[in-house]
Image: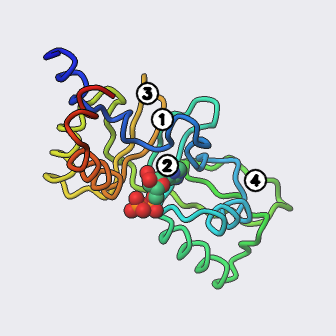
Amino acid sequence: LEAKEEFTHKTLAMDVMRPRRNDPPLTVLTQDGLKVEDVETLINETTYSGFPVVVSRESQRLVGFVLKRDLVISIENARKRQDGIVSSSDIYFTEHIPPQPPSSPATLKLRKVMDLSPFTVTDHTAMEIVVDIFRKLGLRQCLVTHNGRLLGIITKKDILKHMAQVVNQDPDSILFN
Ligand code: ADP
């Protein structure tokens, strides 16, 4: 019983992170290969406050984290300034931008609006530690990785919901679920 109690109380980052087991995958941006219209669609069709940026969908290697509001402002400004930014313009979060064919539309460089070192924990990190880090660093969100691959995200609200659940759970269900 003691071992079981210990086990069930030790919630890990993977138990709190989104997406949950049967949810659609995390909504991410790739550091290249996206057009202004792709990102605008994503902004309009999701309600998330931010998006992890990865090297590629295949690798799921984390590059950074970008807030939705910074994306919105950057794209709006670029379109308004009329510096050749159109729906089909390529967006780059990379440091270097490959040479463009002369006829292609202007590119939009967004590396500077990205947080290059978003806080990350592994999926096996105990939630106790995650909560402590959120408190001490005043985090809004934290990314979860496994073997260097991006797996999920935990927001401050996810933690608050999780803590409310733990408090409301009756002892029997904690011990025997
Ligand atoms: P909050 O948790 O404060 O409402 P968000 O609106 O950003 O913040 O996130 C809503 C929910 O979606 C949270 O449970 C969060 O873990 C999850 N989430 C946040 N960003 C993403 C994303 N890019 N892809 C998938 N899920 C996300």
Query: What is the spatial separation of the Cα atoms under label 4 and label 3, in whole angstroms?
Result: 31 Å
Q: Which residue is mark 1?
A: 150
Mark 4 vs mark 1: in front: 1
Instruction: Identify the residue position indicated by label 4 in the image.
Output: 100
Q: Nearer the viewer, mark 4 or mark 3?
A: 3
In the picture, the disc for residue 52 is 2
Disc 2 is placed on an element classified as: strand
Residues under numbered marks 4 and 2 in contact, where contact means CB atoms less than 8 Å apart: no
Picture layout, residue 128 above or below residue 10: below
Quadrant containing the N terminus in the rendered view: top left
Q: Residue at x 79, y 64 (%)?
A: 88
User: Seen from this angle, which residue lies furthest bottom?
Assistant: 80
Is 170 on the left-hand or right-hand side of 66?
left
Q: Earlier in the sequence, mark 4 or mark 3?
A: 4
Q: Quadrant of the C terminus?
A: top left
Q: Amino acid at mark 1?
A: Leu
Q: Are marks 4 and 1 in contact (CB under 8 Å)?
A: no
Tag 2 near tag 1, CB within 8 Å: yes
For this rendering, which residue is in front, 138 or 169? Answer: 169
